[in-house]
Every structure is written in C-alpha cells, then in structure tokens.
Amino acid sequence: MNLPSTIQLHDLSTGYRSRREEKVISQHLELAIAPGEVVMLMGPNGSGKSTLMHTMAGLLPPLSGEVIISGKPLSSLKMKELARLLSLVLTERIPAGNMSISDIVAVGRYPYTGFRGSLRPEDKAVIHEALRACHLDGMQERLYSTLSDGEKQRVMIARALAQETPLILLDEPTAHLDLPSRLEVTTMLRTLARSLGKSILISTHELDLALGWADTIWLMDREGKVTASAPEDLILDGHIERVFGAPTLSYDRERGEFSIRQSGEKKICLRGEGLRYIWTSRALQRLGYEVCPSTGAYPEVELSDEGWVLLLPSGSRSVYPSITALLQALP
Ligand code: ADP
Ligand code: MG
C-alpha cells in the first residue's frame, strides 16, 4: 500500500501570530494521509486539534513549514482549486434559515458551478449520490432546522461528499451526538473512505471511538506533539495513558479503558470463567476491589451453577442469584 499521499505535512508548525507575539501550538510535524485511509486526530481539549485542522485547510497560515495537497503546496492553490481538493466539516452549527437538505448539499457543488451557477444534470447526480451515501435519500426536502443533531451531521458530510474532494477534514463531527449516532457517523465515514478511496481526517477527544475505528491515530499531547501509529501500538507502548492519564486513573491495557486507580487495600479472589467472570470482575473493580488469584486469605467469589458463591475467611458460605445481590452482601 504505497499510494502517493493525499496530504503531506512537512516540518509544519502551527499556532497564532499577532503583531506582538507568536503563540506556537505544534512544531515540526511530519505527517501524511494515504488514499482510503481514516486518520483520527485525538488529543485532550485545548491540545491543538482545531488549530492543526484549520492550518491544513488553509484557514490559518502555518508559522513555518508546508502543507502539500495532492502534490501541490497549499499556499500556491487558489480558493476554487483548493475547494476541489479538500472539504472541511466543522462542528459549529450553521445558520441554515429555511434551507432544505438538498439546498445545503448543493452548496458542495460551488467549486464546479460558482455560487450563482445553476445545477447541471451531472451536479444533480452527484448530489443524489451524496444523499444516498449518507442515508438521506427521501428526506431531501426536509428543512435543515427540523433535523436531529445526527441528521444535521450527516447533511454536512453529504455536502462535503458533493464537493467531490479526495480529502475530507472533519473537526469533532461526533461531539454533539449520542452513542448510536456517533457510531453511525463514524462507520459511515469509514465505509466512504474504503469505497471511494477518500482520505479522511477526523478530530476527536473521544478515546474509544478513535481506538475502535481509526486506521491510524495522530495522538496529540498537551504540548501539541503528535505521534502517528496504529491505535493498538499506542495502547501497548503506554502512549494513551501518558497523554490522557491522571494520577487517579489507570489505563487497563486489556480492556482498553480508563478506570479509577485501585488502592490495593481491598482484595478479593474470583474463580470462574467466561462472560460471568468478566462482568463480575468489572463489578468488583468498580467497587474498589483488586481481583487476584485464589489464596484463601481474602474473601473469595466462586462462579458455580448455583450462582455467585461468597466464601469469607471466617468459613461462611453464601450463594447469591445475581451480581446485584453479591455486591450488597460484600464486606
Ligand atoms: P483543540 O481543538 O485540541 O481543543 P485548539 O486548537 O482549539 O484545541 O486550541 C489549542 C490552543 O490554541 C489553546 O490553548 C487555545 O486557547 C489556543 N487558541 C485557539 N484559537 C486561538 C486564537 N485565535 N488565538 C490564539 N490562541 C488560540
Ligand atoms: Mg477543537
């Protein structure tokens, strides 16, 4: 898979320059995205994700270095040329007035028609296809203002698709969405990258989403430094914990999630297997227990056919029908 990159960042430094000072956010970035690749730009709030996105989209001048899009320096591209290479989806709600879904998606055709240009049959076909890809067919006459957040986000993605660019940048596209809509938008973007060969960059501060769905993560730390790799490497080498961790949180590398750091004062032994073992173990950890192999010195829970059997060091033995009942009985 050695296709030429859709976008390359060469020694790119981002930030804000005013007459009095220069505020550097990220320095010396060397990054690229291949066709068909989904990259998630992940980092804590305020680390510099939007700053990087805006710089890549030509909305903010780089402090130094270069952005190359489809082989051409961004700084050499005219607005209309750039609009045929890159589309940008921002989180800010747009004041859409009385615009319908199809009106908004049609805006994506402006690099080809001009703002006042009327739509040709081929433009209409592209709009139709974008609506279909975003599961909006049949809804095109609905007013944008009447849509749910998830539907609005799909409309903005359809607009970006109608722009027919090899590169799509989306800044926190799932920020206002509930869990099913977040997954729907994310998996839809992945399908689009695969089927149309588009390069897609999605910024997010949502760890689980990025770890589950990105081909590559650009992990941005609080200093604006970016590490690019497969999600799994970032878990294995402890990067995720370093960037998102806190003294009270520990990252469980097997489960891929943060939990409250256990004090190790409360121990319990758990014997059993399968799904019941996994979820009982989670419940015990949530209550602050460190779950360890059987030793006899601590309370012990055994998963049997009867239910959850609690054995205390005193020798008492009780059986509970559920995790709820077990937790209530624990010391
Ligand atoms: P993120 O998108 O990761 O939450 P941002 O890129 O929005 O982070 O912000 C990164 C840093 O840049 C923050 O410290 C923020 O205060 C600063 N910043 C954002 N916009 C501007 C601006 N227009 N001028 C100066 N500093 C800014
Ligand atoms: Mg941001």
Image (cartoon, helix red, strand yellow):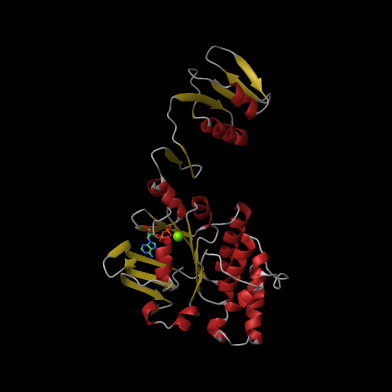
Judge from the rendering whether residue 214 lies leftward or rightward of residue 238; answer left or right.
Answer: right
Give the answer, above or below, for where 304 lies relative to 317: below
The location of residue 174, given as percent across then percent down, is: 55, 58
Tell me, yes or no, if residue 303 can be seen here.
Answer: no
At x 56%, y 68%, the residue is 94
Against 243, is 74 above or below?
below
Q: Nearer the viewer, residue 19 or 186?
A: 19
* Residue 189, image quadrant: bottom right
Asked if residue 15 lies left or right of residue 173, the reply is left
Query: How far across and how far down the image is residue 261, in percent?
Result: 44, 35
- Residue placed furthest toward the left: 20
Residue 154, quarter of the rendered image = bottom right
Q: In what quadrant does ligand 1 lie? A: bottom left
Q: Position of residue 133 (x, y in %)?
A: 64, 69
Q: As rendered, which of 273 and 69 lies closer to the eye?
A: 69
User: Where 177 falls versus 118 (above or below)?
Assistant: above
**Relative horizontal placement of residue 124, taking residue 217 as reference (left or right):** right
Most extreme residue toward the top is 314
Image point (60%, 35%), residue name: 274
Q: Is residue 212 visible?
A: yes
Q: Going 37% across and 82% down the picture, which residue do you hit? A: 76
